[in-house]
Image: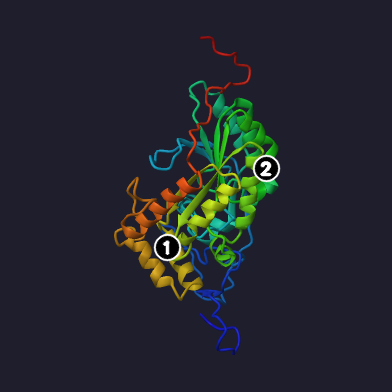
Amino acid sequence: MKNTNDNPNQKPVPVNEMGQYKKGRGAQFNPKNRFLKNEKVRDQIESIDDWSETNTATTYIEDIAKGIVNKVDSPDVGMWYSMNPYQGCEHGCIYCYARNSFEYWGWSAGTDFETKIIVKKNAPELLRKFLMNPKWECVPIALSGNTDCYQPAEKKFRITRQLLEVCNEFNQPVGMITKNAGMLRDKDLLQEMAKKKLISILVSITSFNEDLRRVMEPRTTTALQRLRIIKELSDSGVRMGVMLGPMIPGLNEHEMQRIMQSAGEHGATFSAYTFIRLNGAIKLIFHDWLYKNFPDRADKVWHLIEHAHDGKVNDSRFGVRMRGEGPIAELVRQQFKKYNKIYGLNAERWELDCTQFRRPGEQGKLF
C-alpha cells in the first residue's frame, strides 16, 4: 500500500506486486496453474522479454469446439445439463467459481480468466446436432453454467442469441442467469419463448453499494440496471428471479433484505442464493483482492468465511459447500427464508415445459 501524494489523510491506493492496481479488473495477478509443471514468471518490473506481456486488454480467441452441451453431475446446483458459448469472463467477478476451470485451458484462474475470452463460434451448429440426436430426451438446459453468456463478448459475436434461436425452434426449455443488461437485446426472443414456458431467468444481484460493485464485479452493470432487466422482462411475460450470490459476511450479506425486496417489487417471483466459498485458486485471488481493497476489515471478513466452513474457506461436500455451516451461515439462511416469505418469492409452483419438444420435420406423437 502507498499514498499517491504527501497528504497524510489520503486513503492508501492498493498496488499489486508488479506496480499499480489494475482498475477494471477483479484479479490483480495470475496464480500458478496447478496443471502446468513449468511456467514463465516476471520477476522484475523492468523486464522487457517478449513473453512478459503486461497488457490487460481483452483478447477474443475463436475456437472450434467439439461439443457444447455438458452433463452436470453435481447434485446441488439445480441443473442437469449446461452449455457455455464462451470460456473466461470479462466481468471479472473476484469470487467466480468458474475461474478454476480456466486452468484446464492452460491459463491462469486470475487475470487470464478475465482477459482471454474463448469464443465457441460453432456452438449453434453443435447444439442443433445435439438436439437432433434421437437419444436426447428433453430436459431443461442451463445457459450458461460456467460464465455469463451475456458478457461483453456477446454484443460482438451474438452466439447466445443464436443458441436461443435454436432452442426456440426445437421448443427446448432453457434456464438462464446473468448480471448484464445486454440480455434486453433479446427481449423479443425471450418473450416468444416465455409464451411457451420455455424460459426461466435469474438475474444476479450482490450489492447496491457501487463502491463495492466496482471492485468486486468490475465490468458488470449496476444493481439498478439489473433491476431494470427484471422489470422489463417480467412485464413482457418472462418468468424472472433474483440470485443473491455469493453472500459474503462483512461485505454484502447485510443487503439481503433490500435486494430481495427490490427484486420482488420489480417483478421477480423466485430467488436463490449461495454463501461464499473459495475453492482452488480462488482462495489466493480473493485473499489478495480483499486485503488490497478492504485492509481495514479484511481480517474480519476472512475469519467469518472460515467460521462458516469449519475453519477453512472452502468445503467441497455437496449440499454444504454453497450454504456453509455455523452461526453466520445459519443467519444468512434464516434471513433468506424469512424474506422469501415476506416478499412472495418462491411462492409459486412452476416448471419449464418439456412436453413441446419437437425436432424439425418430426410429426406430433400419437397417443
**Residue at 59% of width from left, 21% of height from top?**
359
The answer to whether the residue labelled 1 contacts the one labelled 2, judged by CB atoms less than 8 Å apart, is: no
Residue sitting at x 66%, y 35%: 191
| Quarter-of-image position of residue 68 | top right
Measuring from the top left, give residue 85's x and y in whole percent: 58, 42
The image quarter in which residue 235 lies: top right
Q: Which residue is mark 1?
A: 249
In this view, 106 is above or below 10: above
Q: Tell me the CA gap for discs 1 and 2.
A: 36 Å
How was the colour assigned to the protein in this rendering?
rainbow
Toward the top, the furthest residue is 367
Q: Which comes sooner in the sequence, label 1 or label 2?
A: 2
Q: Which of the two residues, 42 or 11, is positioned nearer the viewer here?
A: 11
Q: Give the quarter of the image for residue 232.
A: top right
Q: In the image, is residue 171 above or below residue 270? A: above
Please give the residue where the numbered disc 2 appears in the rendered image: 158
* Residue 284 located left or right of residue 223: left
Per the image, label 1 sits on a secondary structure element best described as loop
- Disc number for residue 196: none
